Image: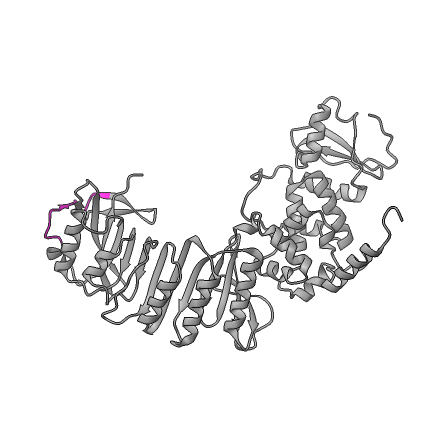
Amino acid sequence: MSVEPEVPIVQVEEVRENPVLYKIISSDNHVFTISEHAVKLSKTLWDLITNLGLTAENALDNPIPVENVNGKNMETIVQFCERHKYDEEEPEYTNYIREFVLPEWDRQLLSIDNEELFQLILATNYLDIQKLMDYCCRVIGDMAKDKTPEELRIIYGIPTDAEDDALERSASDSPGPSG
Amino acid sequence: MNNPSTFLLLNLPMLAIKEVLSEITPLDLINFSMISRKTRLIARHFSKQPPISKYDIILNIYEPHGVQIFHGENLYEYEIVSYKPEDGLRVENEIIKQSKYSEDPVTEFKNYVEYAIEVFDWPVDQLYFYFHDLNDTSYSIIDWLKLRVRSTDLCSMSLFSDQISDDYVSYFLENVEVRRYLTLGCTMSDNFQLTIPRSVERLEITKSAFVTFDQLSSFNCVSIHLSQTSISNKELNQFFKNWMASKSNQKLQDLFIGIKDLESLETIFDLPHEVIDPGTVRTMHRLNHPFPVAGGIDIKRDDGAVATCYTQFGIGSLYLAMLVHLNF
């Protein structure tokens, strides 16, 4: 795999003993370096690395293209993963509410506009990063605190029943593929 | 996204929508379901999956009426009040409360509970019912509970009153299924005949002056906690003799009952027993919780089961405890 980056490589500090680094290329050709511990937080990326057979020796020569995630989101994701790479591992899944306090550092990281947050969640969902998904969903869930149904409709951009009905009618009225 | 202040939640993948709905509090989730038919369908869909399917409801049927739901370790309450409440959430006794004004709190309360049960199918896990106004409202609420409320297997029901409420308690127990735990804090007349449903495992009666020897013998529960009763020392002696002969209360593991004084023990334990050295400390269990017991009196049932009896001072009273040794 050989891709010429169009923009400077974003270097991520690897401070601990494990020197294995991987390169990721975003959909808009930004290149990111991420440590092994950090990349493991993404189930999708780690499965890819495992399946491609990337090792400490060949990892940097084989950048991983991620076509569904742009550079802006990838930068946030790499920052997040590097920040949390040594966190204690959490249970795979629980039937109960995951108890956590959103750390201030992460709240700052996720203080972005709604469109960016929306795109970040799509990227997080694609890359399967549970902790970041939990944190993003906490931020979105906090928007609902102590709001009436009418206020929630505005916050979450939810159509009224009448609007849904009108949309349904216009969809059924529009000509099908055969015209 | 046209409006930057809007987050188009329903455009997210279903998995992400589920994560968000699991994050928001149960009260906000109910409000979310009320936005439109579509959000009600989405809420109903995810209410069949954990963690939302694991929620259950606590009902407070007294002034002000309230519905409580745990979200993780936090307890949220939606209470319906007959005065203009303060805006916003507030924390009272570690419960995060949201208040709503209504001119008809009982109807509003019923509607809210019915809606939560209909959309989310959450069962009632605990119920606290205070027979404050001894009038038809209490009967109509019991009728409503019978028709509309499903309980969990771990359901705990607590009934309270300051006035004699024999008819209300009887009507409640005849009509509402009590699964495991029953706390009776009602004032009862001296000759009240309490019939405990067979499904009740743990019974606590805080105003138990009406309880007779015959009634105690008929309570076939795992745990019986009473305060002062009308049972004499001689009758209590007979009660333990019956237990030792496997004639009554075979399921009993934990008895807690008020006695008059330490001298009563002489009459009560006028039966075969073994006095344990006070320096001997053993681990006993109540509600599966271990705790140490020093000394005591051991009695033995004819099938080999052993129970330790000991006295304990409570609030203004002396209690006799009996704990059957469990084989863990």
Instruction: Say whether residue B43 is left or right of residue B295.
Output: right
Looking at the rendered image, the quarter that the N terminus of chain B falls into is bottom right
Instruction: Say whether residue B166 is left or right of residue B81.
Output: left
User: Which residue is found at the position 34% from the left and 55% from the top?
Assistant: B200
User: Which residue is found at the position 74% from the left and 50% from the top?
Assistant: A118
Q: Residue A177 lies in magenta, yes or no? A: no
Q: Main secondary structure of the magenta part?
A: loop
Looking at the rendered image, the quarter that the C terminus of chain B falls into is top left
The quadrant in which residue B62 appears is: bottom left
The quadrant in which residue B211 appears is: bottom left
Instruction: Say whether residue B168 is left or right of residue B305.
Output: right
> Which scheme is used to colour this image of the protein?
one colour
User: Which residue is found at the position 64% from the left and 64% from the top?
Assistant: A147
Image position, residue B153 (x, y; %): 42, 51
**Nearer to me, A117 or B55:** B55
Instruction: Say whether residue B324 is left or right of residue B126.
Output: left
Does residue A20 appear anywhere in the picture?
no
The quadrant in which residue A51 appears is: top right
Image position, residue A80 (x, y; %): 69, 42
**Nearer to me, B121 or B66:** B121
Farthest top residue in view: A57
Does residue A34 appear anywhere in the picture?
yes
Tag count: 0
**Where B40 sits versus A15, above or below?**
below
Image position, residue A2 (x, y; %): 84, 26
Image position, residue B267 (x, y; %): 10, 57
For the magenta stretch, what is the residue range?
A: B269-281
